[in-house]
Image (cartoon, rainbow, N blue to C red):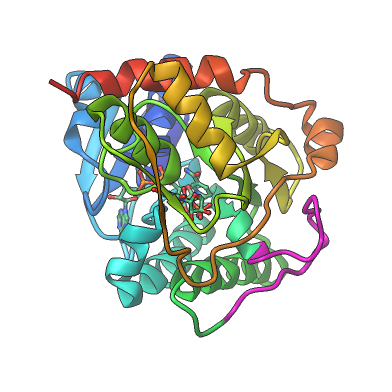
């Protein structure tokens, strides 16, 4: 704490979730250090904060050590879209594993509390539905998604070992599919793909038969959950996501309707190891954090469509 302000490090702070988190932390009067190597994040996401004396931008790769003095760390650095994390899978695993080691080492040295942005992908293609935190998952360790899934699983292992062995104060959030403004328009994730395709009048690319399910959480809800977790005495892991489940086909139809688009739907092969179902059980978050999502998909999509409209002529 310096001058009454908490010094908060956000790794991956120029990304979709990280940049919104920086906004909120600044609003709450913190001193924010945003660390990013701009692998998928952009300066545009944080340019509005650059003139603020309590906001600092560090170009750095979390796979390398860094020495800073901070009170709290949100470890958000890692590409999250399958297309991006599979582009350089070795770098993805390094980001999760070496990044966790470096950030946990920093937390240990300065006595900072550290939150890990883990993921529903630790459950893989789940046989337990909806997913509860005690479910151990079904992940293919050698498939194309493994660089992300196993990297995040190993990061969780490191968090709990630093906690048990070195008494580091950890918080582990398992984030389920989150969407909203500042997702990269060419990010490759389903919401940004469908909205951009619908706005451009291009065909909507539905992978497989579109009957696989996901549960989509609006960014504002997600961040409220993450910040509550950081402030709580809950170690986790704890699911943060919206339990409203739908098929990917239903999402496609909803986006077409809401954008008033004339786009047709085309079917493309289902990527390897694509999970067939995903829905968070958020009983623990409700009970221990008094948190649950409030923003209905219709409203969240409306805000997201308005944001992406700016990218279309
Ligand atoms: P994003 O790709 O928009 O943001 C990730 C950020 O991390 C980017 O700014 C990127 O440049 C940065 N980054 C990547 N590798 C780095 C490295 N080696 N060093 C420094 N910075 C690096 O993705 P997002 O959706 O904002 O996701 C943020 C975090 O939340 C990720 O850790 C992701 O795994 C997790 N998460 C997100 C979702 C989701 O649906 N959005 C779901 C589960 C988990
Ligand atoms: N998907 C799709 N069309 C697209 C992009 C994704 O049908 O253009 C599907 C994808 O196969 C998956 C779901 O949408 O079943 C969610 O994909 P996303 O990449 O957003 O994240 P995931 O939950 O798979 O990590």
Residue 4 visible at all: no
Looking at the image, residue 278 lies above or below residue 104: above
- Given residues 15 and 58, the one toward you in this image is 15
> In percent of the image, x 74 and y 51: which residue is there?
236
Residue 43 sits inside the magenta stretch: no
Image location of residue 267, percent across then percent down: 42, 53
Looking at the image, residue 132 lies above or below residue 164: above
Q: Is residue 31 left or right of residue 141?
A: left
Image location of residue 210, percent across then percent down: 55, 50
Image location of residue 113, percent across then percent down: 58, 47
Residue range in magenta is 123-140
Residue 313 visible at all: yes
> In percent of the image, x 63 and y 64: which residue is there?
122
The residue positioned farthest toward the left in the image shown: 313
- Given residues 40 and 33, the one toward you in this image is 40
Q: Is residue 232 left or right of residue 151?
A: right
> In percent of the image, x 19 and y 25: which residue is there?
311
Q: Is residue 137 left or right of residue 204?
A: right
- Given residues 23 and 231, the one toward you in this image is 23
């Amino acid at each position: 704490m310096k001058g009454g302000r908490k010094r908060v490090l956000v790794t991956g702070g120029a990304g979709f979730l990280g940049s919104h988190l920086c906004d909120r932390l600044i609003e709450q009067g913190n001193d924010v250090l945003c660390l990013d190597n701009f692998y998928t994040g952009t300066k545009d996401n944080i340019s509005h904060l650059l003139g603020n004396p309590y906001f600092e931008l560090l170009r750095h790769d979390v796979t390398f050590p860094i020495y800073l003095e901070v009170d709290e760390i949100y470890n958000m650095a890692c590409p999250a879209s399958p297309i991006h994390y599979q582009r350089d899978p070795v770098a993805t695993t390094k980001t999760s594993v070496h990044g966790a080691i470096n950030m946990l080492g920093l937390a240990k040295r300065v006595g900072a509390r550290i939150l890990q942005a883990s993921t529903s992908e630790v459950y893989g293609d789940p046989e337990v539905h909806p997913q509860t935190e005690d479910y151990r998952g079904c992940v293919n360790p050698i498939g194309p998604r493994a660089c992300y899934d196993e990297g995040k699983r190993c990061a969780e292992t490191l968090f709990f070992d630093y906690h048990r062995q070195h008494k580091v104060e950890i918080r582990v959030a398992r984030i389920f599919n989150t969407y909203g403004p500042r997702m990269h328009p060419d990010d490759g994730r389903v919401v940004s793909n469908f909205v951009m395709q619908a706005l451009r009048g291009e065909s909507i690319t539905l992978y497989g038969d579109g009957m696989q399910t996901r549960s989509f959480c609006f960014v504002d809800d997600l961040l409220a959950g993450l910040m509550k977790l950081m402030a709580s005495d809950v170690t986790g892991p704890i699911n943060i996501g919206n339990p409203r489940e739908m098929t990917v086909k239903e999402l496609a139809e909803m986006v077409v309707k809401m954008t008033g688009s004339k786009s047709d739907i085309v079917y493309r092969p289902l990527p390897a190891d694509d999970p067939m179902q995903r829905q968070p059980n958020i009983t623990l978050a409700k009970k221990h954090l008094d948190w649950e999502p409030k923003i209905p998909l219709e409203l969240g999509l409306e805000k997201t469509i308005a944001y992406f409209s700016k990218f279309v002529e």
